[in-house]
Amino acid sequence: MTKRVTVAGGSKGPVPAQANAAPAGGSTAMDRRSWYMPKASADALAELVDDLHWETRRPKQEILAAVVAEVLARRAQVERRLRKS
């Protein structure tokens, strides 16, 4: 079973217009994308974001950016894993 995951600052449900705007005082543009993924993967990602949010008190969009940056830094390992399957 797959689950659709929409990423827009980690919010669930409708995303307010200001969620796609640049943060106050910052220049980082926000964007909204969606992908389908296995439910277990979507649940694990949501749990990771929630856990890091409560542990660090950082905004969920910042947490997602850090997670993506870590994955991008390990792109070669991800590619090898995908080629094995």
Image (cartoon, rainbow, N blue to C red):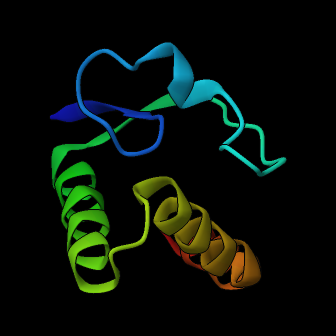
Nearest the viewer among 76 and 13 is 13
* Residue occupying image coordinates x 48% and y 35%: 8
> In x, y percent, where is residue 79?
68, 71
Q: Quadrant of residue 38?
A: top left
For the image shown, how many numbered marks are present on the structure? 0
Q: Is residue 19 above or below residue 40?
A: above
Q: Horizontal and vertical percent for residue 78? A: 61, 75
**Residue 20 shown left or right of residue 38 in the figure:** right
- Residue 52, by quadrant, is bottom left
Q: Quadrant of residue 20?
A: top right
Which residue sits furthest front?
25
Residue 31 placed where, x, y %? Answer: 66, 31
Q: Residue at 50% across / 61% down in the picture? A: 64
Above or below, comparing residue 79 to residue 77 in the picture:
above
| Near-viewer residue (46 or 75) | 46
Q: Position of residue 56 (x, y in %)?
A: 34, 83
Q: Which residue does the image show at 23% across and 21% down from the upper left?
A: 13
Residue 49 can be seen in this image: yes
Task: Please say if 37 is above or below 55.
Answer: above
Q: Relative to 25, does residue 75 appear above or below in the rendering?
A: below
Does residue 32 appear in this view?
Answer: no
2 vs 71, nearest the viewer: 71
Can you say which quadrant of the picture contains the N terminus?
Answer: top left
